[in-house]
Amino acid sequence: MSEKQSSEAITRELAGIALAMQTERTGHTPKAVTVVASDETVVVTLHEALTPAEKMLARTESGASKVEDYHRALFAVSCDELRKEIQRLTGRRVREAAVVVEPATGAIVHAFTSGTLVQIFQLEPHGLATHVSAGVAGD
């Protein structure tokens, strides 16, 4: 298996693991999961990951804040398992992890890095056709 194929297999496996973990933790299955990995960063985006109740709550500023706080707390207590999976698959230890919740779109982004600055720009949706997708930075 080439290095590129190996990277693609890793991102596909991580996408499946992240999807299963999110569904198990919240009881809600995201519409899709995207994993992008580079040499020092893994970014997992769970598309439309908020429940209908969370989306409704997020319509107000205070409700959106509560939804964000909930998902940050959930991430804090559950990200160790995903960290271990990333290390198992990549052979590299995760130094930092963060979560960004976008209540307006229902996206939840998990970023795992080896100390690099991660900037996340979410693009307008154009119709997510696949349930699980993966990409390798630099393709």
Image (cartoon, rainbow, N blue to C red):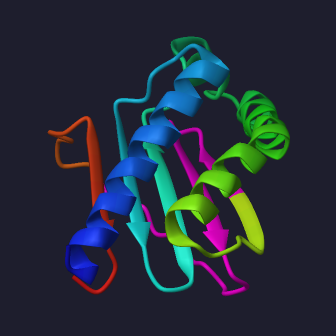
Please provide the residue range marked out in magenta: 99-124
Q: Is residue 123 magenta?
A: yes
Q: Is residue 71 left or right of residue 19?
A: right
Q: Is residue 48 magenta?
A: no
Residue drawn 72% across the image and 61% down it: 98
Give the percent coordinates (x, y) of residue 100: 65, 54
Tell me the quarter of the picture where residue 137 sits.
bottom left
Give the percent coordinates (x, y) of residue 96: 76, 71
* Residue 21 or residue 129, whichever sits in front: 21
Tell me the quarter of the picture where residue 114 sits.
bottom right
* Residue 71 or residue 19, whichever sits in front: 19
Query: Quadrant of the image for the N terminus?
Result: bottom left
Q: Give the answer, above or below, for where 51 lies relative to 92.
A: above
Q: Give the answer, above or below, for where 108 lies relative to 90.
A: above
Residue drawn 21% across the image and 41% down it: 128
Q: Is residue 114 left or right of residue 139?
A: right
Give the percent coordinates (x, y) of residue 29: 45, 22
Marks counted in the figure total: 0
Residue drawn 27% across the image and 65% down it: 8
Tell me the quarter of the picture where residue 10 sits.
bottom left
Query: Quadrant of the image for the C terminus?
Result: bottom left
Residue 4 seen in the figure: yes
* Residue 48 or residue 6, whichever sits in front: 6
* Residue 89 or residue 119, whichever sits in front: 89
Residue 105 seen in the figure: no
Q: Residue furthest front?
A: 1
Give the percent coordinates (x, y) of residue 2: 20, 80
Q: Give the answer, above or below, for where 16 lies relative to 51.
A: below
